[in-house]
Amino acid sequence: MLAYPAFVRLWLSGTVSWLGSFTFGLALQLLLIETLSADQTAIGFVRAAQWLPAVAVGLLAGVLTDRMRRRPVLIAADTATALATGTIAGLAFAGLLTVPVLAVLVAVVGSASMFFHAAHQSYLPQLVPMELLPVANARVEQTTTAAEAVGPLVVGVLVRFLSAPVAILFNAVSHAVAALLLASIRVHEPTPARQPDRQLWRELREGGSWVYRHGTLAPYAVSLHLWFLANSALMTVFVFHATEELGLSALTVGLVLSCAGISGVVGAGLAPRAAERHGVGRVCAAAAWLHPPAYLFLLLAPAGTTGAALLVAGQLLHGLGSGIKGPLDLSYRNAVTPDRLRARMNGTIRAFNWGSIALAAPLAGLAATAYGDGPVIAVGIGVLALSALVLTLSRFRRAEMPAAYA
C-alpha cells in the first residue's frame, strides 16, 4: 500500500482524525460528569445532539457529496470539527460552558462528521485499485482500532493529571492537523459530471432504494442499524456506570476502553485472510456474535478490581468482533455499489445508523435514571443478539466479494 502515496496521506490524516474522535466520546462524558455534574439523562441528550444531525442532514450529505469532489469536503469537515471542539474547550476553561451550549456545539461536530464519513468512504476507492480495496480498508481499520485503543487512554491520562477540557482541546488539535494532511494530497480528482435532470428527492430515493432493495445490503443495513441502536444505549450508561456504580477512576475507564482498540487491531489483521477462506458473509455473521457476551461482562461486573477485569475481558471481545467485521462489510458494500451511488449508499446507511444513536441515547439516559443501569444493559445485549441473528439467517451470510475484486 506504500506504493500509493495519496492513500498513505489519506491514511495518516484519517489516523490523526480518528485519534481525536476516539478521545472525544470519553472526554465529552467525563466533561459532563466531572465538570458539569450531569446525570444519565443529560448525558443521553448531549449524545443525542451529537448524532441528531444524521436525521437532518445524513441523507443530504450523501447526495451532496456525490455531486462534489471528496477531498475539499473532508478538509472542510475536519476544520469545522476543530473549530467546534476548540470552542467547547475554551468555554470550559473560562467557566462559561453549559449543557445547552455544549449540545449545540456537539451538533456541529455531528454534522461535520456526516459529511466527513460520506466523503471518506467514497474517496478511498478512488485512490487504490479495486482489487486492493479489502487490503486498504483493513489497513485503515487497523489504524482506526489502534486510535480507538490509544484515544481513551490519552483521555484517562489527561483527565487524571490535567482536566477534561484539556482532553477536548486535544481533539481540536488532532482534527486541525488532519485537515492539513488532507490538503497535502496532490492527486487529481475530477469534478463529478453535472446532470441536467438532477432532482434532490429522486437522488435520495435512488440511494435508499439501492440499499434497502438489494438482496444482501438490505439485511446487512438492518443488522447494522440494530447494532448502533444497542451500542448507543450501552455506551450512554457505560462510563457513568463504571465511574459512579463500580467506583473506577477516569484513568481506569480509559484503560478499559482502550482494550477494544487493541483487540480490534488483531481482528482487522485477521479479517482479509478469514474472508478469503470462509467468505465475507460467514465471517461477518460469526464476528457479530462476539458482541452480546462482551456486554454481558458489564452487566455482571461487581465494584472494584474484579469488575475492572471483567470490563477488560468484555472490551477485548467487543473490539475483536468490530475489528474483524468492520473492514469486511465496508469493503463489500463499496465493491457491490457503483461509484456514482457510493456516497449516497454510505450516507443512507450512516444516516440511519446515527439516527439510531440519536434515538437510543436519550431513551437510555431516561431509563437508566428511572430504573437503573442494569435493565438498560440487559435490553442492549438482547438487541445485539437480534442484530447478529439477522446476519446469520439472511442472504448476507452467503455474501462473497465480487469476482473482479476478490
Image: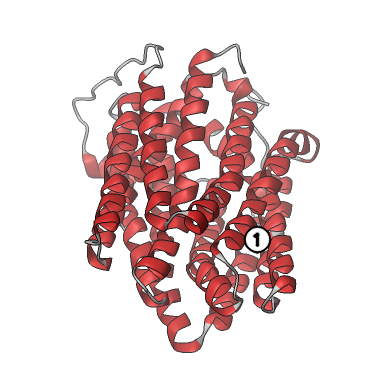
Q: Residues within 10 Å of mark 1 (few under 14, many from 20)?
A: many
The foreground one among 300 and 275 is 300
Q: Quadrant of residue 280?
A: top right
* Observer able to see residue 87: yes
Residue 273, position in %: x, y? 77, 33
Residue 187, position in %: x, y? 41, 12
Residue at 52%, 58% in the rendered image: 160
Residue reaching furthest to the right = 277
Q: Which residue is under mark 1? A: 388
Question: Tag 1: residue type?
Answer: Ala
Q: Quadrant of residue 129?
A: top right
The foreground one among 352 and 374 is 374
Residue 305, position in %: x, y? 72, 71
Residue reaching furthest to the left = 196
Residue 90, position in %: x, y? 27, 50
Residue at 41%, 16% in the rendered image: 185
Residue reaching furthest to the bottom = 371
Residue at 39%, 12% in the rendered image: 186
The foreground one among 66 and 302 is 302
* Observer able to see residue 395: no
- From the viewer's perspective, is 247 left or right of 91? right
Residue reaching furthest to the front = 161
42 up-or-down from 231: above or below: below
- From the viewer's perspective, is 387 left or right of 53? right
The way the protein has been coloured in the rendering is: secondary structure
Pick the quarter of the image with the C terminus: top right
Residue at 57%, 21% in the rendered image: 130
Q: Secondary structure at mark 1?
A: helix
